[in-house]
Image (cartoon, rainbow, N blue to C red):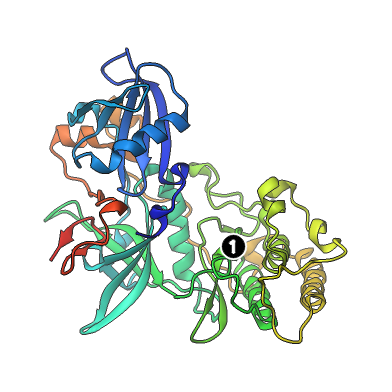
């Protein structure tokens, strides 16, 4: 179903820790997150194995493992030797989730149980539907986080996205998504939604006409973000651009790598949301137009952002249009380049004077650090610094937690009459 039907193993799985197997030093282990089922599995082997082996072995068995299995032992020829449900072997981490009161008041919210999963668009990103008003279904994109490493990133992405005023060329914030660990426990913000726009990204649909006005939309949106709001998107590329089929307007989305212009970043969270000059939107817009026209992705594939220089494409004598790419009738590649290059020159003058987001006339701002769990006296708990809890410790203490596990893609679509909620629960 969607993204995980055609995944590479290193897209579906992420190894987050390695070492000796918990409780049995005869085995080496990898603790692996499966983004498809949204679960953590410890994979043990008799000798140290590389990530490729572990992922391939896990892929042989993951879709058949009961939901409560937290640890498995694999032979050198991928045979499943044993599996464990003992919570003492559970390495799942439960991240901190802020409460609605930690965000601006009167924001629209929706419960996670009110969202029905329709498709899996990527890691921690799903297409969902919900009833916006009685009898009317709304399609949305649900972004969430299940791993502790994303706590600060999502905090800043949500705060940034919800504060961006409605703009015709930016996908807007829709709702905070809330859930609780159980009856009587406070609601937590587990993610947010944005409107779903059909048709796929510009990268997805190479045969769609890319008009000169679409380029102007992109440059206008970048100017608005950078110069009006003091926000740098930081990941301008064809896979983060949509064209609304109803309005024929280009729209930018996905602010998880965004930053405040000139800001050093969230110091308590490894500089998250800090400005990186190598990710400036002007440079990346130039590479994006070049890639849309030529379908040549070699610059980004072969270089880190800090090694990319705008001259690599602007000083290239000819941009050869890919035979499958469709541009606006009667407009040559040279005109697209002229519009881009004129804008780049204009921005050089402006950017020389604007170095900090607070220079922007309508700059947006928000608290730099997300809230955290109280740091308890218990040494085990204190070592986490309030960023997350181990699920095994919560189980041992009898404390509830928000659950995420869902059926694997191979079990989808569900039989007629059944629905998969964003909670992972099958109903109907």
Q: Dividing the picture into quarters, in which one does residue 425 lie?
A: bottom left
Which residue lies at the image location 69% right of the left edge and 61% below the top edge? 284
- Examine the image and state in which quarter residue 49 appears: top left
Where is 54 relative to 274, above or below?
above
Find residue 251 and report its image quarter: bottom right
In the figure, is residue 319 to the left or right of 158? right
Residue 382: give x, y in percent of width and height. Answer: 32, 31
Residue 398 in the figure: left or right of residue 148: left
Report the quarter where the C terminus lies: bottom left
Q: Is residue 303 visible?
A: no
The number of callouts visible is 1
Q: Residue furthest top?
A: 26
Q: Is residue 25 left or right of residue 346?
A: left
Residue 124: give x, y in percent of width and height. 39, 54
In the image, residue 97 lies at what x, y percent? 32, 51
> At 54% across and 53% down in the image, what residue appears?
273
Q: Relative to the observer, which residue lies in front, 186 or 374?
A: 186
Query: In this picture, is 263 found above or below 42?
Result: below
Badge 1 local density, few (<14 within 10 Å), some, or many (20+)? many
Q: Is residue 59 left or right of residue 248?
A: left
The residue carrying mark 1 is: 233
Residue 120 or residue 5, whichever sits in front: 5
Note whether residue 276 is visible.
yes
Q: Secondary structure at mark 1?
A: loop
Q: Nearer the viewer, residue 264 or 201?
A: 201
Which residue is drawn at the image coordinates 64% and 59% (left, top)? 261
Q: Nearer the viewer, residue 404 or 233?
A: 404
* Residue 147 spot, x, y in % from top left: 37, 44
Quarter that holds the N terminus: bottom left
């Amino acid at each position: 179903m969607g993204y995980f039907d055609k995944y590479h193993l290193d897209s579906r799985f992420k190894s987050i820790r390695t070492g000796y197997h918990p409780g049995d030093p005869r085995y080496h282990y990898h603790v692996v997150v499966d983004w498809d089922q949204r679960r953590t599995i410890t994979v043990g082997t008799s000798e140290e194995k590389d990530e490729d082996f572990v992922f391939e072995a896990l892929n042989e068995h993951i879709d058949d493992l009961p939901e409560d299995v937290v640890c498995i032992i694999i032979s050198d020829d991928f045979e499943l030797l044993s599996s464990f449900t003992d919570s003492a072997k559970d390495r799942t981490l439960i991240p901190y989730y802020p409460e609605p009161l930690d965000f601006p008041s009167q924001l629209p919210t929706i419960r996670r149980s009110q969202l029905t999963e329709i498709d899996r668009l990527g890691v921690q990103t799903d297409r969902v539907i919900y009833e916006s008003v009685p009898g009317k279904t709304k399609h949305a994109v649900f972004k969430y986080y299940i791993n502790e490493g994303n706590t600060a990133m999502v905090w800043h992405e949500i705060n940034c996205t919800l504060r961006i005023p409605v703009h015709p060329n930016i996908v807007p914030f829709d709702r905070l998504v809330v859930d609780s660990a159980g009856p009587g426990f406070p609601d937590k913000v587990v993610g947010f939604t944005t409107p779903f726009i059909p048709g796929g990204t510009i990268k997805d649909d190479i045969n769609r006409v890319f008009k000169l006005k679409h380029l102007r939309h992109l440059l206008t949106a970048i100017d608005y973000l950078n110069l009006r709001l003091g926000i740098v998107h930081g990941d301008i590329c064809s896979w983060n651009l949509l064209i609304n089929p109803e309005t024929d307007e280009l729209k930018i989305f996905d602010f998880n790598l965004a930053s405040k212009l000139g800001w050093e970043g969230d110091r308590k969270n490894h500089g998250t949301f800090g400005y990186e000059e190598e990710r400036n939107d002007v440079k990346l817009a130039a590479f994006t137009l070049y890639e849309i026209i030529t379908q040549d992705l070699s610059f980004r594939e072969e270089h880190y952002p800090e090694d990319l220089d705008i001259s690599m494409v602007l000083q290239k004598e000819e941009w050869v249009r890919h035979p499958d790419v469709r541009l606006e009738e009667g407009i040559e590649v040279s005109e697209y380049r002229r519009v881009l290059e004129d804008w780049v020159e204009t921005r050089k003058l402006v950017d020389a004077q604007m170095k900090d987001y607070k220079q922007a006339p309508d700059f947006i701002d928000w608290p730099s650090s997300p809230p955290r769990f109280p740091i308890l006296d218990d040494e085990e708990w204190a070592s986490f610094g309030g960023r997350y809890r181990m699920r095994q410790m919560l189980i041992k203490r009898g404390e509830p937690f928000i659950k995420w596990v869902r059926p694997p893609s191979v079990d989808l679509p569900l039989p007629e009459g059944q629905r998969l909620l964003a909670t992972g629960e099958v109903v109907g």
